[in-house]
Amino acid sequence: MLTDLAIANHRAGDSPFLVSLLPGGAYYESLAKAGIPVRDVGLVRGKPSLRGLLRLTNLIRSNKPDIIQSWMYHADLYSLIALIFSGRWSKTRLYWGIRCSNMDTTQYSLTLKMVIRVCALLSFLPDGIVANSVEGRNWHLRIGYKPKLFTVIDNGLDVSLFQTTPSSRRKARAKLGIDKDAFVIGALARNDPMKDYPNLLTALEKLDDTVCIVAGYGTEELPKVPGLVSLGERPDTLLILQAMDVFISASAYGEGFSNAITEAMSCELPIVATDVGDSPRIVDNCGIIIRPEDSDALVKAIIKLRKNQAMRHTLGRQARQRIMKEFSLQRMTASYKNFYYDPQRFVRKASFPPQPSGQE
């Protein structure tokens, strides 16, 4: 999403400059080809580095940005400290970025827990925070975030890049070695506790004659279950979506705004998603929402859609129309521009569900 935002802004005449805490990354080439400067500060995953912090400080001092938009917890914390050390605290605006909702930190490292806690304590210092989900915003308020401004900007999708036809469906299945008449469900998510692949695999074991395609970092390590096609991390997500009949999002917690759901909806797929993060708001009436960690409910939803092809097609058409109307890339980039131009006005015009008790 950050890559899409940077490229869109670059094409609009702005001058984005990206800094990665870690070297490399799946989107480095896309950014470089678009002509966007990208630097890294040489951190190693899981190892805090004073040298990396000093590199980031020097980049801020030498490039003199008007605005810093950080992206996720570690970048939020590093950018705050580096901006203070750079001597540009009064000249550069800093906005933190939050990309998740109710994280179960017991499933992750002690370092991540500490970073989240420190970010909560220091959240009054940046000029504002942008979350990509209403649930993410509200959950962070509940755990002690007290920012000057806290708004939500939905992720956006270039729908022209995600669409399907009967012909593309046949070709996708042929390339993946899947029978043209098979009933195919699938998920695009890394193998991570929050994505709850065990729930999806349990449901698959209860389904007859069903193919389940999964793609994402670490999915090749999932247990072998009849019907499961594990592809690992793949760049051709469109091809994978084009082979599906139903898209599954089985997250147990932590989901903020699911890009995979919007991509699937743009490809006219009906959605079965757990009631986690903003998934119900995104899906709306274009699929079935179920309780998290409930494989029986997941099975029932899949069977319901399998038995009713007309329902699948209707929900799929509605899904693409919803993405085009509510969650386009153009809408997202315009929202960021409007927020940066006049943050106070943007927040005043925003409408959110009731906030947690005790929060203004």
Image: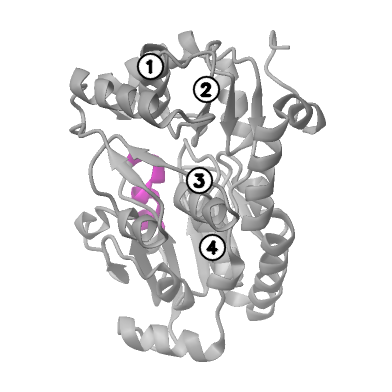
Q: Position of residue 265 (x, y in %)?
A: 60, 65
Quadrant of res 140: top right
Viewer-nearest of labels 1 and 4?
1
User: What colour scheme was applied to this rendering of the protein?
Assistant: one colour
Label 2, label 1: how far apart the Cα atoms are: 10 Å
Measured as percent of width and height from the top left, residue 65 is found at: 48, 30
Q: Which residue is mark 2?
A: 92
**Residue 100 on the magenta segment:** no
Label 1 environment density (alpha carbons within 10 Å; few <14, some 14–19, many ≥20): some
Q: Position of residue 130 (x, y in %)?
A: 58, 31
Q: Are marks 3 and 1 in contact (CB under 8 Å)?
A: no
Identify residue for label 4. 263
3 and 2 marks in contact (CB < 8 Å): no
Q: Quadrant of the C terminus?
A: top right
In the rendered structure, which disc, 3 or 2, sits on the residue that comes first in sequence?
Answer: 3
Q: Which residue is mark 3?
A: 15
Residue type beneath disc 2: Thr
Mark 1 → mark 4, Cα distance in angstroms: 39 Å
Nearer-N-terminus badge (2/1)? 1
The numbered mark at residue 86 is: 1
Residue type of the residue flagged with mark 4: Glu
**Disc 3 on helix, strand or loop?**
loop
Give the CA distance from mark 3 to mark 2.
15 Å
Q: What are the residue bounds of the magenta stretch?
A: 193-203
Marks 2/1 in contact by CB < 8 Å: the verdict is: yes
- Counting residues from the start of the chain, the first of labels 3 and 4 encountered is 3
The residue positioned 30% from the left and 84% from the top of the image is: 177
Q: Do the residues bearing badges 3 and 4 touch, measured as CB atoms within 8 Å?
A: no
Mark 2 nearby-residue class (10 Å; few <14, some 14–19, many ≥20): some
What residue is shown at x 33% (from left), y 29% (from top)? 59
Q: Position of residue 297 (x, y in %)?
A: 54, 52
